[in-house]
Each structure stands twice: as C-alpha cells, then as structure tokens.
Amino acid sequence: MSKNKQPNEEAPKPKGNSYDRLFKENAKSLFIPIIEEQLGLNIKSYQALQEKLIQTVERETDFLYRVTLQKANKEKEILLHIEFQTQDTHKMLGRMAEYHGLIYRKYQMPIQHIVIYLGARKARMRSKLKVNEVFYGFDIINVYTLDTTQLLRSQIPEVILLALLSEYDEEQTETILRS
C-alpha cells in the first residue's frame, strides 16, 4: 500500500476503455471509409451526436406471464405482456418497444405484447413499428478478418493503422509497423 492511500480508499477507476478513446478520436477518418467499403454505403454527410444515453429506467409491467401455447400438436412457450392504457398517446409505441427490449434482455424468449385500451374514444395511437424502425440485428465488421494488404494500400493513415489489428503472417509484422 502506498503511503498516501488510506486503507479503505479505492484506486481511481480508468475513464473508459483506451481503445474506445482512440477509436472515438479517429472515427471520422478511420471507420467511415471502412464502413462505406465493407457495407457498400455511400455516406454523403454525417453529424456526431452525443454518445452518452443517460437514463435510469425502472419499468413495471401491468402483467407479464410465461405461457405455453398449443397449436397442431406442438407446444410453444412465450411471454405474454399486457398493458392497460387509459389515454390515447403517441408515446405508447415507444414505451412498448422499451418494454420489449427490457423483457427480451432479461428472459430471451419470444414476447407477445397486448395493450388493452380503456379510453372513451377509438384509439388512434400507432401499434406497429415501420419496417425501418424495427431492430432486427446488426452488421459486424471484423477488423481481424479484413484484408491486411488492402488496409496497407489505403491513402488514409488511420486506416493503415487497422492493419495492426488484422490477421497477418508474422513475417509481415515489420512491413506493417513501417507503414
């Protein structure tokens, strides 16, 4: 224990992952060209947005059940999520999407969501996401599997640096480091 440190004092925690910081500082010149090439995108312009999405979320569902469905001699287990709603609000679709993410993360099972609307008029709130609003998964760009030679040929110095993270033969190490 150092002289200046008190017995119950915790060591300062590092601020973020060092890779995160390095990549964030160079994202524009480093990843935009790789993303365009690997995913076939033509990015005309972009604007950086705040990275931290700070929100403390605690949600309580009205009803959440694990149910077994029977259909044509087959059983299927799902979660049945029911919410009662008295107001016709445009925010309900986002709230249900948030519930979906939280419930799926915890249980990792198919979920059927139902809102039982108790308002005095016909509900006008959206109940379905548009195709471009649905999260289906994500694309992966595995830097390790990128073509080292192609990375080294880049005119962008930050992209050349990615060659260090790609798969290359040991005899290429000096060439890569010189680049």
Image (cartoon, rainbow, N blue to C red):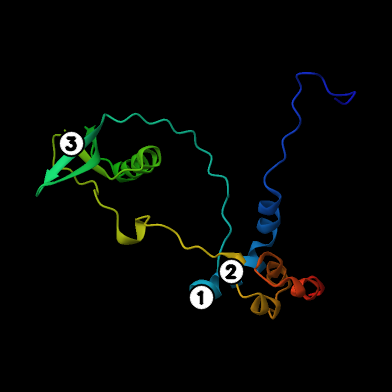
- In the drawing, does residue 112 fall left or right of residue 32? left
Rounded to the nearest angstrom, the CA distance separating label 3 from label 2 is 49 Å
Quarter that holds the N terminus: top right
Q: Are marks 1 and 3 in contact (CB under 8 Å)?
A: no
Q: CA distance from mark 1 to mark 2?
A: 22 Å
Is residue 19 or residue 76 the one in the foreground? 76
Q: Residue furthest right?
A: 3
Find the distance from the CA under tag 1 to the CA under tag 3.
44 Å
**Residue under pointer 1:** 42
Q: Residues within 10 Å of mark 3 (few under 14, many from 20)?
A: few
Seen from the viewer's position, the closer of residues 10 and 92 is 10
Q: Position of residue 125 (x, y in %)?
A: 23, 46
Location of residue 115 by image quarter: top left
Using the rendered image of the protein, determine whether residue 44 is visible from the camera's viewpoint: no
Q: Earlier in the sequence, mark 1 or mark 2?
A: 1
Tell me: residue 156, above or below residue 99.
below
**Is residue 78 in view from this perspective?**
yes
Badge 3 amino acid: Ile
Which of the two discs, 3 and 2, sits closer to the camera?
2
| Label number found at residue 145 | 2
The front one of 87 and 43 is 43
Rate crowding at label 1 as few (under 14), some (14 to 19) or many (20 or more) other CA atoms within 10 Å.
few
Q: Above or below — where is 177 with respect to 92? A: below
For the view shown, which residue lies furthest in the left direction?
72
Which comes sooner in the sequence, label 3 or label 2? 3
Decide which of tag 1 and tag 3 comes sooner along the chain: 1
Amino acid type, residue under disc 2 in the picture: Thr
Residue, disc 3 = 116
- Tell me the kind of residue under disc 1: Asn
Residue 52 sits above or below residue 1 on the image: below
